[in-house]
Image: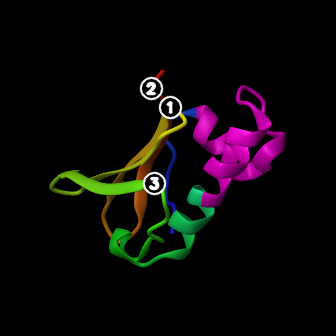
Amino acid sequence: MIKSFKNKLAQEVFDNGDLARGMDSRLASKAHFWLDALAAVSHPDQLPRLPGAVVSQLEEGLWEINRPEGWRIVFRWSNGAEEVSLERLI
């Protein structure tokens, strides 16, 4: 479950998928897949393990989904995802 978003881009991609403004449609589609997966799991350990995606715990309660396309999703976990942000790394 996603409880809150930290930035507008994450909210836009979650709501609109590949039609999101501010991100290439191909990348937005991939980000949307991961945000949907995040909304569906009851713990980050249940997120799918797919080639190219790295799901890791950065510190207690802080997680990231890192993608080789140059972006990541960062979130806090407390009985659901909080402060979800979508960040460009490149």
Residue 71 picture location, percent across and down: 50, 35
Residue reaching furthest to the top: 90
Residue 70: which disc? Answer: 1
- Asked if the magenta segment contains residue 14, the reply would be yes
Q: Quadrant of residue 46?
A: bottom left
> Dot 3 surroundings within 10 Å: few (below 14), some, or many (20 or more)?
some
Tell me the residue at 50%/31% (across/down).
70
Seen at 50% across and 51% down, the residue is 4
Residue drawn at x 48%, y 21% as measured from the top left: 90
Q: CA distance from mark 2 to mark 3?
A: 14 Å
Distance from Cα at disc 1 to Cα at disc 2 = 5 Å
In depth, the one of 82 and 57 nearer the eye is 57
Q: Which residue is mark 3?
A: 53
Q: Residues within 10 Å of mark 1 (few under 14, many from 20)?
A: few
Mark 2, other Cα within 10 Å: few <14 / some 14–19 / many ≥20: few
Which residues make up the magenta segment? Answer: 8-33
Main SS of residues in magenta: helix
